[in-house]
Image (spheres, rainbow, N blue to C red):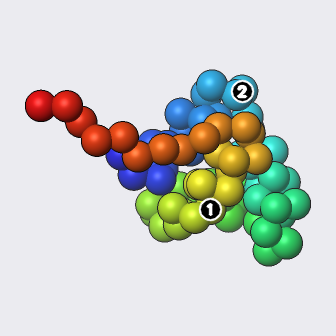
Amino acid sequence: MNSRTFVKILCAKEALTYKKVAEILVEKTRNHYTKTSVSSKLAKDTLRFSEAFILADALGYDLTLTKRKN
């Protein structure tokens, strides 16, 4: 799963707009994000995993690595 798919799933689960995603990222990172820049990053698949991780954390999700059982 890439960051685009991950963020789209989060947006669907939490009923978030890209504007709200941008607001969360600005609040958490103090970097400049807009609805357009978030949309562009997702369309080009250039959203960093760290940005997606910050978003998930802000929404109350824990990301864990779990080894598959054969």
Residue depicted at x 73% and y 37%: 60
Numbered badge on residue 15 = 2
The kind of residue tagged 2 is Ala
Q: Quadrant of residue 12?
A: top right
Q: Which residue is mark 1?
A: 51
Judged from the image, the secondary structure of the residue bearing numbered disc 1 is helix
Q: Is residue 61 left or right of residue 30?
A: left
Residue depicted at x 87% and y 60%: 27
Q: Is residue 63 left or right of residue 39?
A: left
Numbered badge on residue 2 = none
Residue 58 locus on image (x, y percent)? 76, 47
- Farthest left residue in view: 70
Q: Is residue 61 above or below residue 50?
A: above
What is the spatial separation of the Cα atoms under label 1 and label 2, in whole angstroms? 18 Å
Residue 18 locus on image (x, y percent)? 71, 46
Q: Quadrant of the N terminus?
A: top left
Question: Label 2 crowding class (10 Å Cα cut-off): few <14, some 14-19, many 20+?
Answer: few
Residue 23 locus on image (x, y percent)? 84, 54
